[in-house]
Image (cartoon, rainbow, N blue to C red):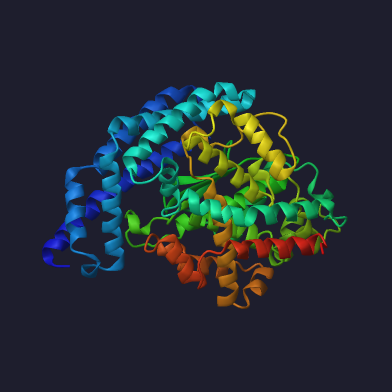
Amino acid sequence: MNETQQKKYEELVSQLTEVSRLGSVMGIMHWDQEVIMPSGAAESRAGQMAALAGVLHEKSSRKELGALAEDLFSAGPDNYSLFEWRNIAEAKREYDLSARIPKALVQELASLSSQGHHVWVKARQENSFSSFVPTLKRFVQLKKEWAGYAFPELSTYDATIDIYERGMSAERLTAIFDTIKTPLKNLIQGVAESSNAPDGTFLKGSFPVADQEALGKKISQAIGFSFDHGRMDVSVHPFCGGGDASDVRITTRYREDNFIESLYAVIHETGHGLYEQGRMREGRDLPASESLTMGIHESQSLFWERMIAQGRPFCGAFLQTFAEAFPENFKNVSAETLYRGINMVSPSFIRVEADEATYPLHVILRFEIEKGLFDDSLKVEDLPEIWNAKMQEYLGICPPNDASGVLQDVHWSGGAFGYFPSYTLGAMYACQFYQALREALPGVEDEISQGNLAPVKNWLNENIHQQGKLYTPDELVLRVTGKPLDPQLFINYLTEKYRSIYSLN
């Protein structure tokens, strides 16, 4: 990089940093809206977020920023370090994207997202899908408009997918999901017919919220979450948010008759939080340091929730911690009983309560519905009926009401179409990453069984968190695991695990 390029790069960094910090403010406002904002402030908050979205859009689409990015980009990657080049390339992509989308559309989407959340919460509480229909129809319409501006070369649904999982398409996802759908249905059927179901009675009872909260924080800290740079609160839907790597905020929700749901939501969100807290220290306000895609982000939450916390070594290490929190329930409970109990397979109406084996079918259902909404083969008004029919086909159960069915997820209330596939892509990534971890650190499961989770966290920090956006998802998976994403590995893992637990032939 010559002196002129260096000055231009420094100016680009300055402008990108400003945009990033304003985005952090938006993140805090979103967290506040979900966690502590009074319900009566919904209208004013929608206006505030729309105004800030407008400012962000203006700054992201400044001609000066675009000219800097274009000029630096034209020099080619050989003139820069990989970190510098990725910042330049990401800045150009984001500028081109912002410049193509009208400010009025950006503001309307931001306002509708804020208002839509409250419409959804009320509709869910009242079990009234019809009251959510106008908002959802408007969102589908606006996202189609957005897709036409953002990625005119892609189908509207591929455009929405690309925001969360760059380079992925509905066609590739269909092929991936077709690989796993029938084997999963067969596995679940076999489990349902098994006479060797785990004993989960010790997981039922009365679990005071204060005790659940204390246990959740203890486990989160053991995993490595820094409460000096984060916090844990309560929300309708568990999530991870906040401002930046120094301010990461996770949430959960509590049921006094089920501590596992809350605890494993904490572990899941802690995985997200560790990704954010573990980002490279250089240029934390710059694009190259950001998390790669939502699929990779989900791999980190599911890595801890499924691969670690639902594994035998973890159960052996933390059985006593569980027993100290709820001594009456854990009398005479062995580590093996805990392992089998938390890995029970039972079709559930609610995605976030679904077990590891049935969860992907929840995702496939949502993917197929979204694909239908965007190719106009499905109508919003028909979604409850379609949803229930697919639940019956895939999981053998039919939701008793819309709150337990089509209204259960927060995503559509914010226009987050194309996000759901990231969950199952994340599970597949996590499975391959765990295999790579075991190969890289042959004694790691012994460390986990002793309660030492630092080697796991450090390996993830080095190999994934600190890689930011230096590579594409496919490149990262290949670098870390030595092979491309392979859905068959995921099916093999699930089949072996649950055939063993349920003594299937």
Identity of the residue drawn at 34% across and 46% down: 153
Residue 364 image point, x, y percent: 60, 46
User: Is there any visible trace of residue 328 in the rendered image?
Assistant: no
Q: Is residue 185 above or below residue 375?
A: below
Image location of residue 275, percent across then percent down:
48, 57
- Tell whether 452 sits left or right of 282: right
Of residues 77 and 277, the one nearer the viewer is 77
Q: Nearer the viewer, residue 71 or 450?
A: 71
At 40% from the left edge and 31% from the top edge, which residue is drawn?
142
Which residue is depicted at the point 28% across and 33% down?
Answer: 103
Residue 290 seen by the camera: yes
User: Looking at the picture, how far across and down is residue 206, in whole percent?
Assistant: 78, 41
Q: Is residue 460 above or below residue 186?
A: below
* Image spot of residue 265 (x, y percent): 62, 48
Question: Of all residues shown, which one is farthest toward the bottom?
Answer: 442
* Image quadrant containing the N terminus: bottom left
> Which one is nearer the viewer's eye here, 14 or 225?
14
Residue at image point 42% right, 49% down: 162
Count numbered badges in the picture.
Answer: 0
Q: Please state if 298 lies on the left or on the right of 330 as rendered.
A: left
* Quadrant occupied by the C terminus: bottom right
Q: Is residue 355 above or below residue 280?
A: above
